[in-house]
Amino acid sequence: MPDSAASIPGFCRDCLKEQTSGARRCLACGSPRLLRHPELRSLSLAHIDCDAFYASVEKRDNPELADKPVIIGGGKRGVVSTACYIARINGVRSAMPMFKALEACPQAVVIKPDMEKYSRVTREVRAMMLELTPLVQPLSIDEAFLDLSGTERLHHDAPARTLARFARRIEQEVGITVSVGLSYCKFLAKVASDLQKPRGFSVIGQAEAVDFLKERPVTLIWGVGKGFATTLERDGIRTIGQLQTMEEADLMRRYGTMGQRLYRLSRGLDERTVETNGEAKSVSSETTFNADISRPEELIAHLRRLSEQVALRLRKSALAGQTVVLKLKTADFKSRTRNRRLDSPTRLADRIFRTGLRLLEKEVDGTKYRLIGIGVSDLSDPARADPPDLVDPLATRRAAAEDAINKLRDKFGKTSVETGYTFGHRRRDR
Ligand code: TTP
Ligand code: MG
Ligand code: MG
């Protein structure tokens, strides 16, 4: 029905011309990449995520790879960091053991990650984002939230078209592609950017949010990982639509503060703003157990593994933190947070782990826990982190050892190098 389509605001993602008819192709350039949405002129919260990030950078730098399946990851024993979309068609996925990936796609070209190169691209993309708005919140090496409200005068355009222009510019000037999600809140902007990858641009408006969410699985909700999804499943809850029919008080009684989050996000209510200061305020990693745990050895093994994840993230985002924060949640959903400030910022798994261990020692008294998390706050530049330690000469040696382990990890993938504590407790889910 051309009539109704014509009344919906729209433009062409290639030539950016406004579309005033309901035609399927752009009236100006013939491109089929048209974007139409009733709320296109008012939405301003975006999430942008690069497509197959590491692989796209490698393809950019070697045009011979353009039509080949490309996997970024370690040697035969490592895991897949990412795979290009051609390799994904063959079933290759992030975090898959390399041998499995090569079983699925034997003709793939495997490339070792070059973190420094990817970080340079990240900085370049981020600088361009900051030309759109000062309100940019990076979430990881290849994605960020942007709040473009109030930028119409600056860009002489609505946020939607400014974002399409940005995506086009990244392709032309950086040589990789991105996917954009546009909505009115962070939760749905992030969901949207994932809907149409690669080179996607998806819009989720206020009017459709509840309906859109109804049939989706609970795992779409921020913070609902595999563990918590199992808990919900046990209670008979699988879809977000089911949460939409439940009372807030009921959800809070069952799941504590997480219940409140379920109540709000399931209805598309999310007031979180785009935070810029210091980018992230903390870097942490946590896990919810399938069955509650009270045994110290098991808690310590998790703590070790999570400390390593935190260190890896600090390294990837070029950050260090000075306060170590341990988080526990008891079987009856009570949260315990303990922290300790260090003499100097750290980015070492071992220092994070040992500090976390001292905090944990006081909490292992037979209490059953359902969650453990470790992280660092007071983030800063890593330049001043982990100075050679006169008091503890071993620390310097440990730092050197960790550097060596990290280099091996980059080379062979995350699970190929295990330290004593995590051995045998490798996580099956990513
Ligand atoms: P993602 O944005 O999750 O994935 P991606 O950019 O490769 O693909 P998509 O198009 O689906 O967004 O992660 C960004 C980069 O982070 C990715 O290119 C490689 C790295 N990464 C890992 O090293 N290990 C992982 O398990 C994941 C998920 C990502
Ligand atoms: Mg990505
Ligand atoms: Mg990402």
Image: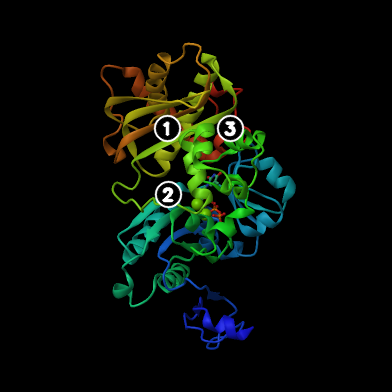
Which of the colour schemes (rainbow, by chain, secondary structure, one colour) is used? rainbow
Which quarter of the figure is the C terminus placed in? Answer: top right
Residue drawn at point x = 31 percent, y = 51 percent: 276
Q: Earlier in the sequence, mark 3 or mark 1?
A: 1
Residue 350 coordinates in the image, percent (x, y): 41, 25
Classify 10 Å Cα crowding around label 3: few (below 14), some (14-19), many (20 and above): some
Residue assigned mark 2: 139
Mark 2 → mark 1, Cα distance in angstroms: 24 Å
Q: Earlier in the sequence, mark 2 or mark 1?
A: 2
Question: In the image, which is nearer the foreground, mark 2 or mark 1?
Answer: 2
Residue 94 coordinates in the image, percent (x, y): 60, 46
Secondary structure at badge 3 equals helix
Mark 3 → mark 2, Cα distance in angstroms: 26 Å
Residue assigned mark 1: 403
Relative height, residue 206 to residue 186 (above, below): below
Relative height, residue 44 to residue 331 (above, below): below
Mark 3 is on which residue type?
A: Ser
Which quarter of the figure is the N terminus placed in? Answer: bottom right
**Contact (Cβ within 8 Å) of mark 3 with mark 2:** no
Secondary structure at badge 1 equals helix
Residue 375 coordinates in the image, percent (x, y): 40, 32
Mark 2 is on which residue type?
A: Leu
Q: Nearer the viewer, residue 35 or 174?
A: 35
